[in-house]
Image: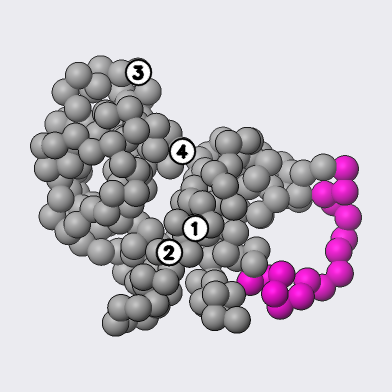
């Protein structure tokens, strides 16, 4: 599965969840709660167990904007370390730099966060990092580059973030355009419409 570059709204309708996690996409899903295309509203038969598990895997990979190779490699890493595999896997996904930038509100979507990281607008502990998959550690300080803080998109995103609930595992200093990855999120912190056990079963088949 390569990186998707089409309409995130259509893809969200296909998967049945808000992949962008934005109000705009949610309003569109509420208005058209069925798959896109002329056959989107047709009732289908009961999906197979394999199909259910595949769709769950696709949902999560697309939510975080990852290729199949990246996604599977990360899952195999999660499965090889002590702990609950599903929770460890979600924590590894949350530690990606592009995701942390999104969670902190510097970007309005993960797709935009990847662009900001790739264009050199994001610093980790005072050093520029332009790799979206960079793994953030507990205690790392994530900040917007000095020269990028006046950008319209970033200014708008930070103003919007002040009005929203901040993810409890990050600590923000909005006025200084920086935040700290304070701890690993617990499973109950992550309001993800995903059954990670299906993904474990998919890769264990």
Q: Position of residue 16 (x, y in %)?
A: 66, 54
Q: Position of residue 90 (x, y in %)?
A: 39, 65
Q: CA distance from mark 4 to mark 1?
A: 18 Å
Is label 4 or label 1 in front? 1
Q: Which residue appears at 15% of the width and 45% of the height? A: 141
| Label 1 Cα crowd, 10 Å radius (few <14 / some 14-19 / many 20+) | few
Residue mark closest to the camera, 1 vs 3:
1
Disc 1 vs disc 2: Cβ atoms closer than 8 Å?
A: yes
Rounded to the nearest angstrom, the CA distance separating label 1 from label 2 is 6 Å
| Label 2 to label 4: alpha-carbon separation | 21 Å
Element on which disc 1 rests: helix
| Residue 179 occupies quadrant | top left
The residue identified by callout 1 is 69
Q: What's drawn in magenta, residue-wise?
A: 38-53
The residue at the point 82 percent across, 42 percent down is: 37
Q: Residues within 10 Å of mark 3 (few under 14, many from 20)?
A: few
Q: Which residue is mark 2?
A: 73
- How far separated are the C-alphas under marks 4 and 3? 17 Å
Q: Earlier in the sequence, mark 1 or mark 3?
A: 1
Q: Is residue 27 left or right of residue 119?
A: right
CA–CA distance in space, label 3 to label 2: 36 Å
Q: In terms of secondary structure, what is the magenta stretch mainly?
A: loop
**SS at circle 3:** helix
**Mark 3 = which residue?**
152
Residue to which mark 4 is pinned: 111
For label 2, the crowd category at 10 Å Cα-Cα, with few meaning under 14, some 14 to 19 and many 20 or more, is few
Left or right of residue 57: residue 119: left
């Amino acid at each position: 599965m390569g990186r998707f570059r089409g309409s995130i709204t259509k893809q969200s309708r296909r998967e049945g969840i808000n992949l962008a996690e934005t109000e705009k996409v949610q309003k569109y899903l509420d208005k058209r709660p069925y798959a896109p295309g002329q056959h989107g509203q047709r009732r289908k038969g009961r999906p197979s167990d394999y199909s259910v598990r595949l769709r769950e895997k696709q949902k999560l990979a697309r939510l975080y904007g990852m290729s199949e190779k990246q996604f599977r490699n990360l899952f195999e890493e999660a499965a090889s370390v002590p702990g609950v595999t599903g929770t460890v896997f979600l924590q590894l996904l949350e530690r990606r730099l592009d995701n942390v930038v999104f969670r902190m509100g510097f970007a309005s979507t993960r797709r935009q966060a990847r662009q900001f990281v790739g264009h050199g607008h994001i610093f980790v502990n005072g050093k520029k990092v332009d790799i979206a998959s960079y793994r953030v550690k507990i205690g790392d300080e994530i900040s917007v580059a000095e020269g990028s803080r006046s950008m319209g998109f970033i200014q708008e995103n930070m103003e919007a973030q002040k009005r929203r609930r901040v993810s409890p595992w990050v600590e923000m200093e909005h006025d200084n355009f920086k935040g700290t990855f304070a701890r690993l999120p617990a499973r109950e912190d992550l309001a993800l419409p995903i059954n990670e056990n299906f993904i474990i079963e998919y890769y264990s088949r």
